[in-house]
Amino acid sequence: MRGIEAALKVLTSDITTGAFASEVLRKLADREKMKAPDISLASSLVYIMMRRKELWENIAGRFMRSQEKLPVQVSVGITMGTGGILELRRFSEGVLINGIIDYLKRREETAKYASVANAVLHKVSETGGEILEAMSKSSVLEERAMYSGIPVWSLPAWLKTWSRPELGDIFAMMLQPACASLRPTPGKLDELSALLQAQEIRYYPSDISSALRLASTVLPVNVPGFSSGLCTVQSESSILAASLVGKFYEGGRILDMCSGRGVKACQILQECPDSQIECWDISEGRSKSAAGEFSRLGLTDRAVFRVGDAVVLEPEVQPSFVVLDAPCSCSGTWTRKPESKWRLDWQKLDGFAGIQTKLLEHAVSLCKPGGHVLYVTCSLLKQENENVVAQVLMNHTDCSDMTGLIGWRGSMFRKGKPYGIYIWPRNAWLDGFYCALILKK
């Protein structure tokens, strides 16, 4: 029961406005000293709910008679219960329903709605599976989107980027669970492998990057060798994107305009051993996290950290290579961080395209002649990618797209239309990414 209650607390927290569900759950588990089975159940319920929330709301809504607005805890309980009933395979439906109803009954503001929730969840248990099966085979694009966990409102943006057959592939990819990958610190692969083997942690070498693939997701601090700097938890798409700096770097200062928690920046320094980097981020918290990451890997003396708006900041030294991992819809990582997609709408999506263009304009203006700008997003939508690059190239005739030199081949890569290149989330270790390499003449 504690796992069910914890999941409901997480889902009614501030994850819809910015917090990550995994962090909220971790803090809750620490505070309430939850046991591992309860944490596992809570994590599964939260992930099931957030991955396909719109689908569960649609199915549950078919059994709702009243149009009365329900308290948040009740609507979330019904939606989470619907997802749990239809997707959990190793947990009793009866226990799940009883746990949700008990939670609602114990609260004055929700007690009177417990009977409604109970009736809906039992109907879902009886016939919801048939509805789910029908939606999985539906030719209606909106139903296919819901089944795959893609917000219906975003379909026009997807249709402007990909053909119907390609979109069918993306729908299928969005259904696969995400798994973690580890980037070994250079020279530490053998030590890391021995440590993983000693603790009987299964891993698989990647066929497209330097990563070691794990069979599930992990908290970085729980990975053997993480605290001592033997490895970094990082998706393979992120590793591939950052590796482009090492491939084209020719010396001079590197600028990382939106460095976040510094994961890519640390990889860049490890792959470019004679380089120095300046890291910007608008968030003081993320900048402090980046400083901690550099310290963990022994790279602090090669970096400068600055907090501020990357649209207006000026570098201490003019860079010969600028990395812009721009804020975006994160549509390529919706499988790994599903809560992020439910925070979006058309206005926010359009806003991303505007700030991305401003950032890339600034990146190009800051770069030395003869240098490179690497534009990266974890989005699969053209309006955040090719359209942004096209606008900037049109304004800067001294710049050209050099993405054709990257040389990536295989089913997990797609050429942009016409600029840049996509990494498709073909497997559990890849996120959807976009990269464009620009040369300033």
Image (cartoon, helix red, strand yellow):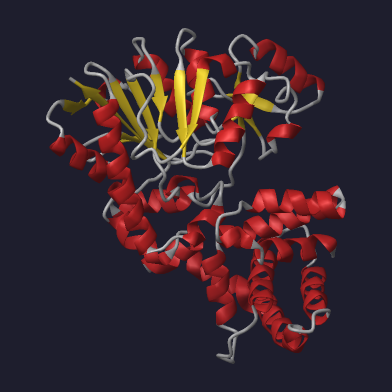
| Residue 67 to residue 334: above or below | below
Q: Nearer the viewer, residue 199 or 134?
A: 199
Q: Is residue 52 left or right of residue 214?
A: left
- Residue 361, percent from left and from top: 25, 37
Q: Is residue 313 left or right of residue 59?
A: left
Indicate the quadrant containing the N terminus: top left, top right, bottom left or bottom right: bottom right
Residue 296 figure quarter: top right
- Residue 50, percent from left and from top: 59, 60
Which residue is located at x 40 percent, y 24 percent? Answer: 255
| Residue 408 to residue 29: above or below | above
Residue 349 figure quarter: bottom left
| Residue 164 to residue 416: above or below | below
- Residue 290, percent from left and from top: 57, 31
Residue 416 figure quarter: top left
Which residue is located at x 64 percent, y 28 percent? Answer: 292
Which residue is located at x 87 percent, y 51 percent? Answer: 33
Q: Is residue 137 visible?
A: no
Which residue is located at x 84 percent, y 48 percent? Answer: 36
Q: Nearer the viewer, residue 168 or 372?
A: 372
